[in-house]
Amino acid sequence: MAKIYQVFVGCPFLIAIRENYDRLKEDLEKELPLHIVLADTTAISSTDYLLEHITNLVRESAACIFDATGGNPNVSLEVGIAHALPTEFLLTIYTRKPRTQQSAEKALEREGERRPIISDLQGRNRIEYKTYPSLKRQVINRYLTKLPYMQRWAAFRKRYSSYTAPALQLFQEMRQSGRTVRPRVVAVLDGTGIRADDLLAALSEVKLLAVKRGRVGGIYYPAK
């Protein structure tokens, strides 16, 4: 079952592109309850394990973002997996050109990139960006806001705007291990004047988290 709060990102390792997604992950996780997973396949040598690894990440994600700049082979594989499962995904294309055509060709050759976009996806709706602010704005406004989990977040912010900052701190705690516990919530809220029970009740009301009791008690992301 897909994790409704998780978004998978596949992109080329071309420095100018990868830096955008490292920054995107950092910013989105500061501002939103989502967990952003960047594909990191540099240390995987086995083709079979690579396929299994990527398939599991894509299958476990509620949505995927693939930067198809240059028709990168790894990204092409990831898009193919998303097609086969199937899984909802968004394509992005970096369109800013280097100062000279020669420098562009050299940069692409170093990274093994020669095609402008995966050929079979030429007609698919996609986001084109030249700057990081444009990428971030379009990804949020044209894609992430449509996710059911993000719609719950919008409802939460509308009803409980003063709880937004501590709620984001709570999600940061949960990303580390998939759960947190009530004493940690109390610590996060120290000095805010907000009661732990009130925050947890508000987040539970819109199904942004689930509170479990008993031996496996704790605070978790919801299963659905």
Image (tube, helix red, strand yellow):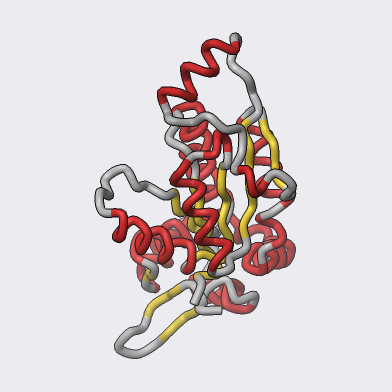
In this rendering, the answer to whether 15 lies above or below 197 is above
Image-based side of 130 in relation to 178, left or right: right
Image-based side of 50 in relation to 141, left or right: left
Name the one closer to the observer, 6 or 109: 109
In this rendering, the answer to whether 203 lies above or below 112 is below
Name the one closer to the observer, 145 or 159: 145
Q: Residue at x 64, y 49 (%)?
A: 120
Name the one closer to the observer, 216 or 94: 94
Q: Residue at x 56, y 79 (%)?
A: 224
In this view, the residue farthest toward the front is 119
- Relative image position of residue 53 (x, y in whole percent): 35, 60
Q: Can residue 169 be seen here?
A: yes
- Relative image position of residue 104 (x, y in whole percent): 54, 17
Q: Residue at x 43, y 84 (%)?
A: 212
Image-based side of 117 in relation to 113, left or right: right
In this rendering, the answer to whether 219 lies above or below 212 is above
- Relative image position of residue 216 (x, y in whole percent): 33, 84
